[in-house]
Image (cartoon, grey):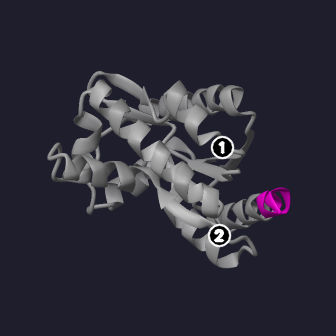
Amino acid sequence: MPFVVVITGIPGVGKSTITKLALKKTRAKFRLVNFGDLMFEEAVNMGLVKHRDEMRKLDPLTQKELQLKVAQRIVEIARKEPVLLDTHATIRTPAGYLLGFPREVIEILNPNFIVIIEAAPSEILGRRLRDLKRDRDVETEEQIARHQDLNRAAAIAYAMHSNALIKIIENHEDKGLEEAVNELVKVLDLAVSEYA
């Protein structure tokens, strides 16, 4: 039976950093899979984009098709080994917010746990401004807060379709990273005990 732990958070929250550090500390043996990387790979292969940040500008129907393809790939991986799925619960697009997982996708993935990484909007804004490698949209602190609220709502909807447990982990600038990593380690260790 596939076993998937979803880890999500808006851009700049520190999700990928926390995930990588937690995987080094945990007893859990998860395969880290980045949903966006797989979507980008599919989109490049289809000639739709050249740069990752173009993904969110694809039309919603195309994004959904990519999501469905990627979900199937992830389930195949998760049948062989537990997957820690790094993704976004919602994606801000020019037309509005897109669910990272439409109903059909969440039902395919059927995650066991959903972990949301959050931080204060001012912290996220500061991290985004310091990250010169990405072409991020500029958002106000209010928009960032709204995006985090939408992520919580999305996680609840995902849990309704998968019976996943939801855990919120805060990643604050003042000693928050280590605490966030340790909290994720606890979740992953619990997941392993559930999986075994």
Q: Amino acid at mark 2?
A: Ala
- Please state the extent of the stretch shown in magenta in the rendering: 190-196
Check residue 128 for magenta coloring.
no
- Asked if disc 1 and disc 2 are in contact, CB closer than 8 Å, the reply is no
Q: Is residue 116 left or right of residue 187?
A: left
Q: Taken as a whole, is the magenta stretch helix, strand or loop?
A: helix
SS type, badge 1: loop
Say if 91 sits above or below 119 in the image: above
Q: Earlier in the sequence, mark 1 or mark 2?
A: 2
Q: Is residue 194 left or right of residue 103?
A: right
- Image point (73%, 39%), residue name: 164
Mark 1: few/some/many CA within 10 Å (<14, 14-19, 20+): many
Q: Position of residue 154 (x, y in %)?
A: 58, 29
Q: Position of residue 118 (x, y in %)?
A: 59, 46
SS type, badge 2: helix
Residue in front for this viewpoint, 169 or 69? 69
Say if 3 sits above or below 58 in the image: below
Q: Which residue is mark 1?
A: 111
Question: How far is mark 1 from mark 2, CA to CA?
Answer: 19 Å
- Image point (34%, 39%), residue name: 66
Q: Is residue 172 visible?
A: no
Q: Position of residue 98 (x, y in %)?
A: 40, 28
Q: Which residue is mark 2?
A: 22
